[in-house]
Amino acid sequence: MVRLDRVARLVSLRVGQGRRHGRLSVWFRPRSYAGSVTANRDRSTPTRQRDGVDWVIGTRADVSWISDGTVTGLEITSAIPPIYADYCTIELPETELDDDSQRRHDQALVGALSGHSGAQPWWLGYLEMGSGEDVVFSDAPRVTLYSGWHYVLIEAGPRQAASWRSYGFEGPWKGPLPDLMFPRDRSWLMSTLWDDDWTCVGGSAALVTSLLDHPDLRTRARRVALGEDATPPGHIAR
């Protein structure tokens, strides 16, 4: 069920944006992606600096496979292209004010994704939902996905996904993790759409099973199949 406090907080942002179409501690051994994120890129590639690193900013070419593979509707393909072996949805934690619940959720999600990624960079997408929204690099070029929504796309890694946005009342209402994440080899995709209070994931059967079995996710995770309504029970898709 849609929570009234979340609706009230976003009502000014959601007009005309219908879908139908503190910090996170590092709980795994971080890898350095600084060398690899700029590899095989020419000097015209946009970058932004943070933590002493020039991070590559993504372009339309990096997400065209998502645009080409998703369609407006209630199915998982509204967020995830139909190219994966398995799919699931994960409802966001029920309370905004309980940072501990949000941290456990985020740690479980990023930990599971990391376990099925290997040593490669991730693309992190931050959805621009309104003025003042933390998209990490406010002056970076945007890419457009789904229903004309704009994202700042950055090639980084799980450590940055877990630490670049803050917890608490000043942080994003859906939590500090990026709204869109996928590794360079596109072996999985995670996307939390504008209007949804759940996350969509596509990947291997092993990845989806690890999410469904995780003690901090399993009560809110549900496997979905292509062709069926992916809206979690009790929720409303817009």
Image (spheres, helix red, strand yellow):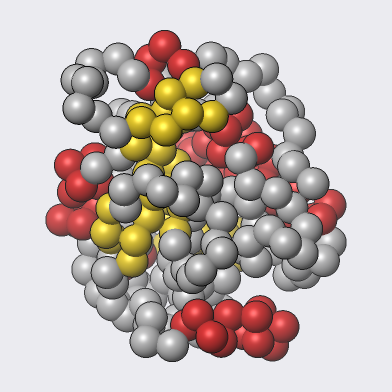
The percent coordinates of residue 182 (x first, y second) are 40, 40
Residue 54 found in image quarter: top left
Residue 174 seen in the figure: yes
Outermost top residue: 35
The percent coordinates of residue 23 (x first, y second) are 74, 42
Name the residue nearer the viewer: 58 or 138.
138
The percent coordinates of residue 67 (x first, y second) are 21, 57
222 versus 176 height, above or below: below
Q: Residue at x 20, y 27 (%)?
A: 44
Q: Is residue 40 left or right of residue 8?
A: left
The percent coordinates of residue 58 (x first, y second) are 30, 39
Residue 215 seen in the figure: no
Q: Quadrant of the N terminus?
A: bottom right
201 versus 17 height, above or below: above
Q: Is residue 198 left or right of residue 154?
A: right
Name the residue nearer the viewer: 227 or 34.
34
Outermost front residue: 139
Name the residue nearer the viewer: 43 or 111.
43
157 versus 70 height, above or below: above
Q: Quadrant of the C terminus?
A: bottom left
Q: Residue at x 42, y 33 (%)?
A: 48
Residue 21 found in image quarter: bottom left
Name the residue nearer the viewer: 176 or 137.
137
Q: Is residue 222 left or right of residue 170?
A: left
Residue 134 found in image quarter: bottom right
